[in-house]
Every structure is written in structure tokens, then in C-alpha cells.
């Protein structure tokens, strides 16, 4: 999920031409904290709406982004401080006094307003929430695995700072922003009513994870308690997941399209899966007809879970070679020994610390690609993945290219994919397009 970083592209400097203006809203009660009500003016045949009470004005370039679908108003774009409670619904206007929409106020952090709607007349109530839950379910009625999918994807489905995954018989709610607490109690009964899960868990993703300060297990919100091993199906393969886990339940749902692409390119190839985690890409490669599959991961428990997944999918649990250790150190050993593969997947975490050796995708992806280039056979392929929000696509591809060049190799982009359809993204929401999956062919 996106963090609170600012958009990386250049923002447009002008306000888009408007063919119509929103109709005048009936004014609410008074209250401090807002600018004085703007005088009425007719422009393009439509009067400017009158908004009484607290509201926020934003510069025209920000207004343009919001109208195009960006769901956040950053705090430094708010022209006057807001003295409002957390979760208050507030109108958002441009500098000319034209209403853009309504959002939830967030008192702390880089984001001041999370947009709810661009409709002129809008109420944030249980009826609106229920309609949004039902609409999100309808959007996923075709082409999405029934047992392992995202059923609510934050702002794109109208629920700022929150996401919900279906994992087998249970739901796992992710809280990405404190603002979600303002409506979570109303949402949970709707999830029970519409999705009928056996139970619901909540994972708090607001605080970062460090080796010295780990997240607690997911909190049991409703229904029956879940066992540590739930079996889910994705495209006919079985994976064991744990919805009570403090971080990942064991299957990254947003990588589904990447797994499908990887499977399609695996036939008759030797495959190396770096940062293999619980082995989902390796299972895909085996089913795709790979000659051999090697997994590299720093955690031995990840290999153990992979063997469980192989058994659940009716495959030989020993069909994959597993190697435990630091990826950089092992890549150098492989290079020195002349060991190469036809197809290598590189899917590092955005940040990791293994025995004092740190990796940051923002700074180190080029160095990683240089090391990977030493173990790719002639004509081989690399599936390079980044889910680091702050690593823009242009910077990601630049890092990949520089790493390949530093290794004395040449590579070409031959295919790519991104988020699956159950992870929709609003237009103009740069941060929402965080996942980058690129297939490269080496000379």
C-alpha cells in the first residue's frame, strides 16, 4: 500500500478548463476555522456554490489533481490551519471558491485530507458505506480468485486508509491510516453481512517494523478465531496462509499478475527465485514446466512454508532446491563458481536488515541488479520487481539499467505487468501505482 510520500511527477501548473460548475449546496451550520463565504459569481452559466462553515481551500494545481482522482490533500497544500476533530467530513474548494468535493480530516501526518467524494451533495453515513462495500464486491465478480483476493482497496473503493483481503474463510483488514478508526466500527458489521466470513482480523500497518520494535499479531475483530494454517486457492495452486500473522499472511496478492507472467516463461528453463519468501513463484515455475527451481531466502522458515505449499498443491515437497542466506553474498558465490540460470526473479523487500547488512530498494536496487547480472545465462531473463512506493518507475528502470551496464551486460525490456484488477487505482494517483514488474532479456 502507498505511504504518505508526495507525488514524484511534476504537478500541472494550470487549472483545467471546466465545462460546468457544481450546483449550490445548502449551507450547513456556522463554525470557525474556514474562510469567509465567497461572493456568488456566475461563470459558464453556473453560479458558484456557497459553502458555509468549516472548509478548506487548496491551490489550483492541487485542485486539478484532486479532480483527476488524486485522493490526498497534503498538509502543506492547506492554506489555513484546521481546528477540526479527526474524521470530520470537510468540503474542499479551489481558490475561486468552487467546490471540489468532500474529505476526511486527519489532524496529524503529511496528509491533511483524504478525499471521500467529488459529488457536490454528499453524506458520509452507513448507507453510503454499505453501497460502497456492495460496489466493491461487484467490481470483483469476474476474473478475481474467490479465495484469495482484495475485496476493498482503500481510496479506490471509497475507504480511505484501509484495505480488506479475503483469505479463504476469513477476512483480513489492514489499517494504513489512523483515520480509518473513525468508520471501522460501522464497517465491520457490513463486512459480516455482505461477505459472510467465518471471522475477521485487523492488522495495524501504521507503525513501521524494525528488528527491535515488531508489530503484534493481527487483532481478532469478529467471528471465529482462525487457525494458523488456512488453505487458499489461486489459479488451481494451494497456499497456506496465516491471517493472525503480524505482517504478511504468507501470500502477496498484489503479485498475482507477476506470478502468471513468470509461469508463462518458465517452460524448459532453470529458475532461480531470489527473496523467495513462501515460494509462490517457485510453484508457478514448476507447474509451468521449469527444468529446475532454486529458492534463495534469508529465513529458513520461509522454505518450510514453501514445502507445505508444495504438498498442499500435490507436488513433491522436495522438488525445489532451497538455499538459506544473504542474497548478495550468495550471488557472489554463484558468480565465482560459474553457476547461472535461464530465468531469475528478483523480488526484494523495500528494506531489509540481514545480520547487519541492510538493503534499501531506493538506494541499492542498481547494485542488486549488477550482482544478479552475474548469474544470468546468455539469452536468459530476469523478472525484476519493486513495490517501493517512493521508487518511481523511471528511477527503478534507471537503477536496473545502470546495474546491468555496471556488470558489463546488456538487457532489454520484453514484457511487464502491474497490479491485478482487485487492486484498482484512481486516475492521477501516482502513489497508488506502487508495483513495478519488468521482464528483461539479457544478451
Image (spheres, helix red, strand yellow):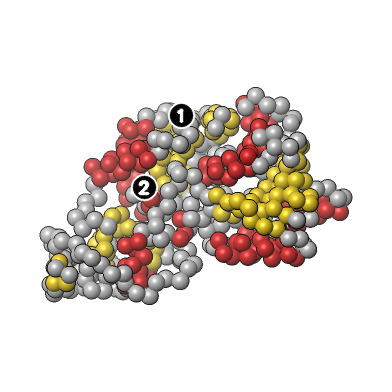
x 59%, y 54%: residue: 386
**Of 420 and 199, the residue lying toward us:** 420
x 63%, y 39%: residue: 263
User: As drawn, which residue projects farthest toward the right?
Assistant: 337
User: As drawn, which residue projects farthest toward the top?
Assistant: 314
**Of 19 and 371, the residue lying toward us:** 19
Q: Is residue 363 shown above or below 262?
A: below
Instruction: First in sequence, mark 1 or 2: give its number.
Output: 2
x 38%, y 75%: residue: 13
Classify 10 Å Cα crowding around label 1: few (below 14), some (14-19), many (20 and above): some
Q: How many marks?
A: 2
In the rendered view, does 324 fall on the left or right side of 437? right
x 32%, y 72%: residue: 15
Per the image, the residue denoted by label 1 is 169
Per the image, the residue denoted by label 2 is 157
Classify 10 Å Cα crowding around label 2: few (below 14), some (14-19), many (20 and above): many
Can residue 324 be seen? Answer: no
The Cα–Cα distance between marks 1 and 2, rounded to whole angstroms, is 22 Å
Q: Is residue 101 shown above or below 258?
A: below
Local secondary structure at mark 1: loop
Q: Are marks 1 and 2 in contact (CB under 8 Å)?
A: no
In the rendered view, does 432 fall on the left or right side of 437? left
The image quarter in which residue 359 lies: bottom right
In the rendered image, residue 326, in percent from the top left (x then y), is placed at: 74, 51
Local secondary structure at mark 2: helix
Residue 82, disc: none
The image quarter in which residue 100 lies: bottom left
In the rendered image, residue 435, in percent from the top left (x then y), is placed at: 54, 53
Amino acid at each position: 500500500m502507498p505511504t504518505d510520500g508526495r507525488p514524484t511527477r511534476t504537478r500541472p501548473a494550470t487549472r483545467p478548463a471546466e465545462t460546468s460548475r457544481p450546483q449550490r449546496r445548502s449551507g450547513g451550520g456556522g463554525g470557525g476555522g474556514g474562510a469567509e463565504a465567497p461572493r456568488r459569481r456566475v461563470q459558464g452559466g453556473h453560479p458558484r456554490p456557497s459553502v458555509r462553515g468549516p472548509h478548506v481551500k487548496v491551490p489550483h494545481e492541487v485542485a486539478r489533481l484532486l479532480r483527476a482522482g488524486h485522493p490526498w490533500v497534503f498538509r502543506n497544500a492547506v492554506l489555513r490551519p484546521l481546528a477540526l476533530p479527526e474524521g470530520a467530513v470537510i468540503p474542499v474548494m479551489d481558490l475561486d471558491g468552487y467546490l471540489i468535493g468532500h474529505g476526511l480530516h486527519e489532524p496529524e501526518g503529511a496528509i491533511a485530507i483524504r478525499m471521500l467524494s467529488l459529488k457536490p451533495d454528499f453524506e458520509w453515513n452507513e448507507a453510503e458505506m454499505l453501497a460502497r462495500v456492495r460496489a466493491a464486491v461487484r467490481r470483483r465478480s469476474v476474473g478475481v480468485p474467490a479465495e484469495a483476493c482484495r475485496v476493498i482497496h482503500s481510496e479506490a473503493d471509497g475507504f480511505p486508509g484501509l484495505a480488506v483481503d479475503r483469505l479463504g474463510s476469513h477476512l483480513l483488514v489492514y489499517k494504513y491510516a489512523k483515520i480509518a478508526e473513525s468508520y471501522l466500527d460501522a464497517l465491520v458489521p457490513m463486512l459480516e453481512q455482505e461477505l459472510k466470513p467465518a471471522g475477521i482480523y485487523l492488522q495495524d500497518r501504521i507503525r513501521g517494523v524494525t528488528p527491535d520494535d515488531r508489530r503484534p499479531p493481527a487483532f481478532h475483530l469478529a467471528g471465529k478465531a482462525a487457525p494458523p494454517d488456512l488453505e487458499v486457492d489461486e489459479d488451481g495452486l494451494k497456499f497456506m496462509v496465516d491471517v493472525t500473522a503480524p505482517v504478511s499472511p504468507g501470500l502477496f496478492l498484489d503479485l498475482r499478475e507477476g506470478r502468471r507472467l513468470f509461469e508463462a516463461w518458465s517452460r524448459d528453463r532453470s529458475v532461480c527465485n531470489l527473496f523467495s519468501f513462501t515460494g509462490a513463484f517457485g510453484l508457478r515455475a514448476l507447474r509451468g514446466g521449469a527444468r529446475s527451481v532454486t529458492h534463495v531466502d534469508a529465513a529458513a522458515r520461509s522454505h518450510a512454508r514453501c514445502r507445505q505449499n508444495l504438498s498442499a498443491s500435490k507436488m513433491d515437497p522436495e522438488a525445489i532446491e532451497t538455499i538459506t542466506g544473504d542474497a548478495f553474498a550468495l550471488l557472489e558465490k554463484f558468480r565465482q563458481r560459474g553457476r547461472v540460470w535461464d530465468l531469475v526473479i528478483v523480488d526484494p523487500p523495500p528494506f531489509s536488515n540481514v545480520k547487519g547488512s541492510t538493503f534499501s530498494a531506493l538506494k541499492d536496487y542498481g547494485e542488486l541488479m549488477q550482482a544478479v547480472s552475474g548469474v544470468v545465462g546468455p539469452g536468459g531473463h530476469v523478472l525484476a520487481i519493486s513495490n517501493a512506493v517512493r521508487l518511481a518507475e523511471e528511477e527503478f528502470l534507471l537503477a536496473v539499467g545502470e546495474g546491468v551496464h555496471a556488470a558489463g551486460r546488456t538487457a532489454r525490456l520484453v514484457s511487464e505487468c502491474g497490479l491485478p484488477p482487485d487492486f484498482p487505482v484512481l486516475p492521477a494517483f501516482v502513489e497508488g501505482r506502487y508495483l513495478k514488474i519488468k521482464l528483461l532479456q539479457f544478451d
